Image: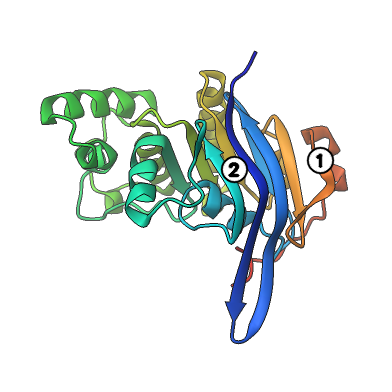
Amino acid sequence: MAQKIAEVIDLKKTYFLGGIVVEALKGLTLSFEEGDFVAIMGPSGSGKSTLLNLLGCLDKPTSGAYYLGGEDVSQLTDDELSEIRSTKLGFIFQSYNLIQQLSVLENIEVPLVYQGVPPAECRERCMEIAEQVGLGGRVKHRPSELSGGEQQRVAIARAIVNDSLIILADEPTGNLDSATGTEILSLLCRLNDEGKTILMVSHDEKVAAKARSIIRLRDGMLVNGEESTPQELHDVDSGETPKELLDR
């Protein structure tokens, strides 16, 4: 039986923007199991990016609980959340978020450096991960010398190098052409087949269809209060507009 790896209970998030109260999340209750590959979808302003930020310990909920690996992390201090991010979570962003001054290998090493892993062990593990994502011959290059797909592979390598509990992917193919995006999705599917847990925000139905299940949000709530399978994607609104301030 798969182990429950993360759970949110009555999770709420409220923002105050120019005197306006915005209820980004209105009491979500969800759980994720080890080995899940879940796509989070919804129109602009639905709360999907807010949910990803909370799951990634990049923000704190207004109320409710978030259990990650059995620990309630919803009310931890900023320093404690930073520790959680570096040891239990891996992030893949649409814009890659690589450090331009560092080489591919050095970018992959960043999470392990923060954990104080000895240099020799760090270098060996990162070389293995670079090979795993198809970058063995590019480890000395800097991000500016790589294609978009190669940069996203670096980001994926960085996300898995610390053996994270969950990989959080925010529009991981958003800046890529369709062929390269397909390659990145194939890599994510392979990692999931190997046991990695992946939670992915996407506005693209074809991208979301690669996941094992889909969570649909609207106005900070679950649509129909349940998850769906990729086959039910026709129920999801298409033609989503680009992210705006309230799409959190």
Q: Which numbered disc flags the more N-terminal residue, 2 or 1?
A: 2
- The residue at the point 18 percent across, 31 percent down is 117
Q: Give left or right: position of 245 versus 57.
A: right
Judged from the image, the secondary structure of the residue bearing numbered disc 2 is: strand
For the residue carrying disc 1, how many other residues have a C-alpha within 10 Å: few (<14), some (14-19), or many (20+)? few
Q: Which residue is painted at 56% across and 19% down in the image?
A: 193
Looking at the image, is mark 2 or mark 1 nearer the viewer?
Answer: 1
Horizontal and vertical percent position of residue 76: 42, 50
The amino acid sitting under disc 2 is Met
Q: Is residue 178 visible?
A: no
Q: Is residue 49 visible?
A: yes
The amino acid at mark 1 is Glu
Tell which of 15 and 236 is nearer to you: 15
Task: Tell me if residue 196 comes above or below residue 232 in the rendering.
Answer: above
- The alpha-carbon separation of the residues under discs 2 and 1 comes to 17 Å
For the C terminus, the image quarter is bottom right
Quarter occupied by the N terminus: top right
Front-lying residue, 70 or 125: 70
x, y percentage for residue 152? 42, 44
x 51%, y 57%: residue: 60
Q: Residues within 10 Å of mark 2 (few under 14, many from 20)?
A: many
Q: Which residue is under mark 2?
A: 200
* Residue 12 percent coordinates (x, y): 65, 58
In this view, 166 is above or below 100: above
Q: Residue furthest top?
A: 1
Q: Quadrant of residue 144?
A: bottom left
Disc assigned to residue 226: 1
Label 1 SS: strand
